[in-house]
Image (cartoon, helix red, strand yellow):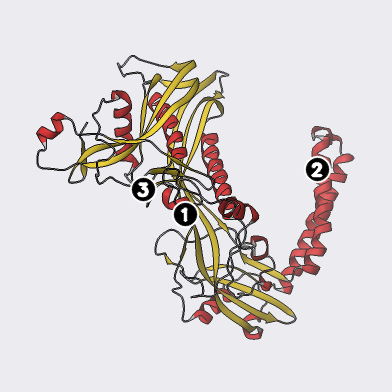
Amino acid sequence: MVLERSTEDRIAEVMHPAKITKGVADRFDSHILNIRLKALNLTDSLTITESYLVYLPFWRFTAQGLAVACGHSGYTERSGNKLRNEYEELVNEEYTWTKCACDSGQYGIKELWLEKGGEVPYTPGDVAAMDAEGSALDANEDGKAAIRGMVKAYLAKRIETVTFEKYFIIPKVFELVYAPVWIFHFTYDTGHFTAVIDAVKGDVIGGTSPMNLTARTRLMILSFVTGAAMTGISIALIFTPWAALVSDVIQVIIFLCSIALCMVAYPAFKEGKTVTTSGTMADIARMRPPARVQKKLTDQEVLHRNSTVLQCPACGSQLERPWGEVVARCESCGALLDITADDADAVPYSIAKPNFLSNTAMPCQSPEFIPFWRFTCDIQVKDYLCTGKTDTGLPDIQGKRDYYICAADIPRYIAEPWEVDLTIRNPECEYYDNTTKLATRPIYINQKTARELTEFLFLRYETEKPGILQVLRYDFTISSEEIVYLPYYKEESSYIPGV
């Protein structure tokens, strides 16, 4: 699982190839025939004025949503007994957020309807595509906020009263995805209408069609009759003796609803020229595939990317400016750098030697040196409440100690047990001299992400203890950080630590 590096150093552009290239008109005719309340002679009288294939851009942000939440929910039995259930929830799931990078208010399509898989690299100019608008940085922040909202919504369904909660969003991939659609413009009588068909699966995404006049008339009459009946009922209740049993508020609501229904019926009949078949396709008839133009950076992006020149603090060579934060070596001097859009700082690092036991057990095998962020943390718990707690003898990781976060492209389900083990053991290692040239795995998790994973490691460890955590208040401080490369021996699909 690649985190952060492929996300923020540059924005990838991919596209779903169009698979529906023949028989599009037949699919359009089928779409028209399946519309309810359409004009009776629609298929014989419509005229297709234009049809074309166009690619729509979408921002797609994928992140790991991490959260720890504790609390309780209560309910009352029929007997009157009040019960309370206590909950402890741990969220560690992948979430995906998409948003149309065009003017979604104009086109009506707000989210990407295609699942991941089958994308190919996008080359500007190869296909007719709408130009992506807006700021990539703003879209990135919108994605983080949306995924945080997804996690909160999930926990809100589980826990009624929250006593402790903490959220972390770990970015994975941020990219611009182009999805193909067929656009049909057609006329009927004096109206202009549109249909949109997915060019990958052939499904109808949305569109508008002329509505059946007879059906509209019947709906208007039914609305007037219903409104008049509701008005009569509300007036009759005023003069009926048993009407006192009915709340005055209910009578007023019925009366107001009847008036509103009558007021809406005629304008809907007069102006309701179309019936929407799917989605919200407001003003889609104005959409045309413009010529592809180079995306302009916003003022914020220009300020972040071009205001200063990034230089290596060790040798002074110019560095490529990333979109976010990456950790990489300087190509000139080999120094390990933490590079952001504004600055570049040297990161201290060390390479641990395999211990005597691993050298003896694997004399003919060379280890892989996997990078870990090592943070010196001080966690002081100020308030703690856990119901049903039992003593299991698990070591405590509070107080001052080193926390380890794997920074390599290692699946998290493999890396997380390593991190807990190293944080508990805090192994003492011997290190190579920094002048020693050794092949090491690249770093994919930057410092900001690793800090959040460090705090989540502590919270996950506390929730995995027996009992149900209810309250946890603590001070979390980091006094130093560095990259340490630890030796691991790979054996088929598993790894054996060398320290």
Q: Earlier in the sequence, mark 3 or mark 2?
A: 2
Q: Which mark is residue 253?
A: 2
405 is higher (above) or lower (below) than 223: above
Eye-nearest disc, 2 or 1:
1
Give the image quarter of residue 214. bottom right
Tell whether 442 sits left or right of 205.
Answer: left
Residue at image coords 51%, 39%: 151
The nearer-to-camera label among 3 and 2 is 3
The answer to whether residue 51 of the structure is visible from this angle is yes
Q: Distance between the residues labelled 3 and 1?
A: 15 Å
Q: Mark 1 points at which residue?
A: 320
The amino acid pointed to by label 2 is Ile
Q: Nearer the viewer, residue 139 or 240?
A: 139
- Is label 2 in a helix, a strand or a loop? helix
Image height of 79 relative to 107, above or below: above
* 246 sits left or right of 62 in the view: right
Amino acid at circle 1: Glu
Specify which label sits upstream in the sequence, 2 or 1.
Answer: 2
Q: In this view, does 205 lie to the left or right of 114?
A: right
